[in-house]
Amino acid sequence: MPAIISLRAVADALEEQSDQNDSYLNPATGEILTVTHEEERMLEEQDEDEDDYDEASLSQWQVDALKQVREFLAQKPLHLLPDAFAIHEWQIMNDFAEEQKDDRTRNILSRALHGSGAFRSFKNSLDQFGIEEAWFRFRRKALEDIAREWLEEHHLSYE
């Protein structure tokens, strides 16, 4: 029987997504594990039946972590959570900018999103207007909405 999945845990995992990792959900247990692409590469290079790693080049904690990752990834079924590209961080920032009631704030945030350094310009503009907390709340709600939609698409119960 599938577990009741924590919406908060899925949203937390989405918040940590980057182009350097993937996060997996075990629907039977509700456990989520984020795995770096480097860890995935190291596991692919190693024979599946081998349980020892090149301990000369890895510290003990890395060896332990790889064993944990291998054990987790061996569980079936696993669901791959949406990756950083599926989250559309730029669109979330644009939606936040468009929601601003003050014309000046809305225009500056919208302009910050275009051109090189858009993410940094956006963050600087948030700071300029003192609306970082509003942004964090908006972003968190957007991530929870993405998590909710993903869980429903996969017919997973959540709370």
Image: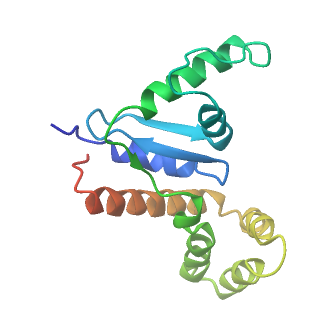
Residue at x 72%, y 68% (from the top left corner):
129
Residue at x 23%, y 40% (from the top left corner):
4
On screen, residue 92 above or below 6: below
The extreme right residue here reads: 116
Q: Give the x, y percent position of residue 14.
A: 51, 51
Q: Give the x, y percent position of residue 59.
A: 74, 14
* Residue 147 falls left or right of residue 16: left
Q: Give the x, y percent position of residue 153.
A: 28, 63
Identify which residue, 46 or 1, lies in the foreground.
Answer: 46
Q: Name the image colouring.
A: rainbow
On screen, residue 140 above or below 35: below
Residue at x 35%, y 60% (from the top left corner):
150
Position of the N terminus, as image quadrant, is top left
Kindly indicate the quadrant of the structure image that contains residue 123: bottom right
Please count the marks in the image. Answer: 0
Identify which residue, 34 or 66, lies in the foreground.
Answer: 66
On screen, residue 104 above or below 149: below
Identify which residue, 68 or 30, lies in the foreground.
Answer: 68
Q: Give the x, y percent position of residue 102.
A: 62, 83
Residue at x 77%, y 77% (from the top left corner):
112
